[in-house]
C-alpha cells in the first residue's frame, strides 16, 4: 500500500463527484481511506487522510446524506485540526440539517484556525441570516419600528432621552408594540409622532417644525452611520519583528504591482524580475508565484508554467490561501497542460480546481477539453494498416453469414481509417443483412459524403431505399449513380426494378403502404405544403388544361413526378 495508490483512488473519486456519480465517488474515497489507514500519518510516504474524509463528506452531502457527511467532516477535523476545510464541511452538513447554532459554531471554529478564509466567512454570514430568519417571529411593522433596540436609540438623543423617563410615554410605546391598531389614536401625541419620524426617517410634520424638531432632524441624519473598517494595529503596538514583517509584505505588494504593469505591456523579463522580488520579500503569498506562472505561459514555456503552478499550489495550501486562489493556479496549470497536448491531466487539474472553488467558466472549459480529448484519442487510434486487417476480418465474417461480427469488424475498420468510404459502404451491406435499414442508409450517406462519386454507395443506398419502400428516393439514388457511371449494372438494374415496382403496385394495400412511406418523407411534405403545387393539383382535377399548362414548368413537373413516385399521387 502506498500513498500513490491512495491518491489514485482520490482522483477517481474527484472525477466521479464531478460527474455527479456520488455512489462511485464515495466508494473511491473509501478505498483511499482504506489504503491510507496502513500508511504513516506524517513524514515520507504519508497520505492526507483528512482530505479523503473531506472529499467523502462532500460526496455524502451531495447525495443528500447529511448525517454521514457530518461524521466524515468530524473525522477530517480530528485528522487535521488546522485544516479549515474540515470546519467548512462540518458547517455545511449542520446547515443542511438545520442545526444552525452548531453550524455557526463550526464556521467560527474554522475562522479561529484560518481568520482570513473568505469561504468560511461567507458561509458564516449565510448561516447567521438563515438562523435569524428562522428564529424571527412574525411581527407587525409598527412593533418592528418601536422594537426595544430602536427605542434604546432615543437615549442618545438630546430631546427624546427625556421621554424615556415618562411612564405615560413608555406605556404608549409598549401598547404600540403589542397592539398596532392603537397607533392611530396614540399618534395624536406629538411626542409619538416625533419619535416615529426619527426612527423611520419620515418627516411627519413638514412645514411645522419648531427648534426641537429641527434638532431631531439633524440628529436623525446621523442615526445610522456607515460601519467603519476595522482599524489596523497602531504602529507602536507592534513589535520590531512585526513592523519589519509588515514592511516586507507592503514592499512585496508594490513589487507585484510593478510586475503587473510590465506584464500588461508584455515586458516579460521585467515582469519576472518584479515578481521574483515580491517572492523574496513575501514567500508565503502564492499569488506572486501564480503571476510568475502567467509570464511563463505567455512566453510559451508550458513546462515551467506547470512547475510554477505546482509550487504556487504547495505554498498556498501550506499557508492556508483562499480556495479561489488555489483554484486559479490549478486552472492555469490545466491550460498549460492542454497546450502541451496532455488533455487528460489538464482535465484532472480543472476538476481539482472545481473541488477547491466551483466556477461555471471552468465547468465549460472541462466540457470543451473533454471534446478535444475525444478527438485526440480518435486521431491517435487511426491506423490505415490495421483498418485493412479489420476490413478483411469483416469480409470473412460477411461471407460466413456472421453479420454481427461483420458489423463489429467494419466499425473497427472505420475507427482505424474513418476517411475510407468503402468501409462505410461495407458496413451498410452488413447492417442491411441484419434488416437495420435506417442505420445502413446512414452508413451509405457517410460513404457518399466522403466520396460523392462512389457509385457503389449510390447503388447500395438505392437498394436500401427500395427495401424501405421509399421508391421515389431509390429512383433518385440510382439516377445519381448513372450520372457518374452511365452503364453501371447495379444502378441500371435498380432503376428498372424500382420503376417496375411503381407500375405494378396496383393493389390498394400496396398503394397505401407506399403512400405512407412517402408521406413520412420531409421533402414530400414540403412539396404538398407548396401553395403552387396545391393549385396545380386542383387544376388537374377541375381544369385539366390549366393543369397541363402548369406542368410545362420543369420545376413543377419534377415535383409532381416525385409525388407520383412516392405513391402519394396516383395517375390510375
Image: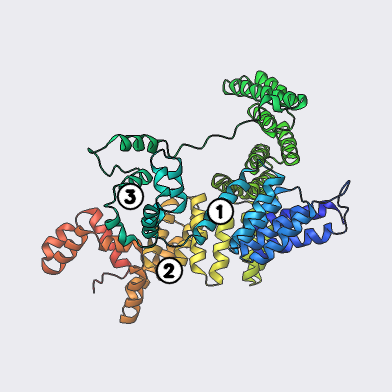
Left/right placement of residue 190 relative to residue 553 reads right
Rendered image: mark on residue 246: none
Element assignment for label 2: helix
**Residue hosting label 3:** 192
Instruction: Looking at the picture, tell me which residue is in the foreground, 408 or 375.
Output: 375
Mark 2 vs 3, N-terminal side = 3
> Quadrant of residue 20 in the image?
bottom right
Q: Is residue 262 above or below residue 529?
A: above
- Mark 2 and mark 3: Cα distance apart in space: 94 Å
Mark 1 vs 3, N-terminal side = 1
Left/right placement of residue 523 relative to residue 390 reads left
Instruction: Looking at the picture, tell me which residue is in the foreground, 72 or 179.
Output: 179
Q: Is residue 543 above or below residue 277?
A: below
Q: Is residue 231 visible?
A: yes
Element assignment for label 3: helix
Where residue 108 sits in the image (x, y, percent)? 65, 50
Mark 2 vs 1, N-terminal side = 1
What residue is drawn where x is 44% and y is 51%? Answer: 484
User: Which of label 2 and label 1 is nearer to you?
Assistant: 1
Rendered image: mark on residue 466: 2
**Residue hosting label 1:** 128
Element assignment for label 1: helix
- Mark 1 and mark 3: Cα distance apart in space: 33 Å
Instruction: State the quadrant of the N terminus.
Output: bottom right
Instruction: Looking at the picture, tell me which residue is in the foreground, 368 or 284.
Output: 284
Instruction: State the quadrant of the C terminus.
Output: bottom left
Label 3 crowding class (10 Å Cα cut-off): few <14, some 14-19, many 20+? some
Amino acid at each position: 500500500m502506498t500513498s500513490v495508490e491512495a491518491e489514485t483512488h482520490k482522483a477517481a473519486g474527484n472525477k466521479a463527484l464531478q460527474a455527479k456519480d456520488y455512489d462511485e465517488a464515495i466508494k473511491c474515497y473509501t478505498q483511499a481511506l482504506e489504503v491510507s489507514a496502513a500508511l504513516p500519518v506524517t513524514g515520507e510516504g504519508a497520505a492526507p487522510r483528512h482530505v479523503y474524509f473531506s472529499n467523502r463528506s462532500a460526496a455524502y452531502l451531495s447525495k443528500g446524506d447529511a448525517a454521514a457527511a457530518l461524521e466524515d467532516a468530524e473525522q477530517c477535523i480530528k485528522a487535521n485540526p488546522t485544516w479549515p476545510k474540515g470546519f467548512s464541511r462540518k458547517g455545511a452538513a449542520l446547515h443542511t440539517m438545520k442545526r444552525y447554532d452548531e453550524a455557526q459554531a463550526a464556521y467560527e471554529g474554522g475562522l479561529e484556525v484560518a481568520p482570513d478564509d473568505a469561504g468560511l466567512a461567507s458561509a458564516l454570514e449565510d448561516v447567521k441570516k438563515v438562523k435569524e430568519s428562522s428564529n424571527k417571529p412574525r411581527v407587525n411593522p409598527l412593533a418592528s419600528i418601536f422594537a426595544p433596540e430602536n427605542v434604546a436609540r432615543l437615549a442618545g438623543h438630546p430631546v427624546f432621552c427625556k421621554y424615556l423617563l415618562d411612564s405615560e410615554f413608555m406605556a404608549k410605546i409598549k401598547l404600540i408594540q403589542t397592539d398596532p391598531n392603537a397607533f392611530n389614536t396614540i399618534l395624536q401625541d406629538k411626542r409619538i409622532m416625533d419619535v416615529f419620524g426619527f426612527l423611520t426617517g419620515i418627516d411627519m410634520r413638514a412645514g411645522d417644525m419648531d427648534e426641537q424638531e429641527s434638532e431631531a432632524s439633524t440628529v436623525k441624519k446621523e442615526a445610522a452611520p456607515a460601519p467603519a473598517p476595522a482599524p489596523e494595529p497602531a504602529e507602536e503596538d507592534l513589535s520590531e519583528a512585526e513592523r519589519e514583517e509588515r514592511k516586507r509584505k507592503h514592499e512585496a505588494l508594490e513589487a507585484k504591482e510593478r510586475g503587473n504593469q510590465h506584464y500588461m505591456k508584455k515586458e516579460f523579463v521585467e515582469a519576472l524580475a518584479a515578481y521574483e522580488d515580491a517572492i523574496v520579500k513575501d514567500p508565503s503569498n502564492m499569488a506572486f508565484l501564480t503571476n510568475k506562472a502567467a509570464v511563463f505561459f505567455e512566453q510559451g514555456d508550458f513546462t515551467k508554467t506547470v512547475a510554477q503552478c505546482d509550487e504556487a499550489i504547495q505554498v498556498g495550501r501550506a499557508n492556508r490561501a483562499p480556495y479561489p486562489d488555489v483554484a486559479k493556479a490549478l486552472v492555469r496549470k490545466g491550460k498549460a497542460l492542454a497546450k502541451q497536448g496532455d488533455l487528460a491531466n489538464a482535465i484532472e487539474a480543472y476538476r481539482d480546481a472545481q473541488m477547491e472553488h466551483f466556477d461555471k467558466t471552468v465547468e465549460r472549459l472541462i466540457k470543451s477539453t473533454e471534446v478535444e480529448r475525444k478527438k485526440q484519442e480518435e486521431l491517435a487510434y487511426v491506423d490505415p494498416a490495421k483498418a485493412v486487417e479489420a476490413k478483411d476480418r469483416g469480409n470473412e465474417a460477411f461471407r460466413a453469414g456472421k453479420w454481427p461480427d461483420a458489423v463489429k469488424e467494419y466499425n473497427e475498420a472505420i475507427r482505424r481509417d474513418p476517411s475510407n468510404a468503402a468501409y462505410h459502404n461495407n458496413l451498410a451491406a452488413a447492417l442491411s443483412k441484419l434488416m437495420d435499414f435506417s442505420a445502413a442508409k446512414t452508413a451509405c450517406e457517410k460513404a457518399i459524403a466522403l466520396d460523392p462519386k462512389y457509385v457503389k454507395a449510390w447503388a447500395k443506398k438505392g437498394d436500401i431505399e427500395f427495401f424501405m419502400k421509399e421508391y421515389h428516393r431509390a429512383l433518385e439514388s440510382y439516377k445519381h449513380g448513372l450520372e457518374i457511371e452511365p452503364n453501371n449494372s447495379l444502378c441500371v438494374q435498380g432503376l428498372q426494378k424500382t420503376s417496375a415496382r411503381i407500375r405494378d403496385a396496383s393493389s390498394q394495400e400496396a398503394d397505401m403502404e407506399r403512400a405512407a412511406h412517402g408521406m413520412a418523407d420531409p421533402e414530400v411534405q414540403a412539396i404538398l405544403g407548396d401553395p403552387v403545387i396545391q393549385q396545380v393539383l386542383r387544376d388537374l382535377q377541375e381544369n385539366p388544361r390549366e393543369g397541363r399548362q402548369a406542368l410545362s414548368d420543369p420545376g413543377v413537373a419534377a415535383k409532381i413526378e416525385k409525388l407520383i413516385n412516392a405513391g402519394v399521387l396516383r395517375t390510375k
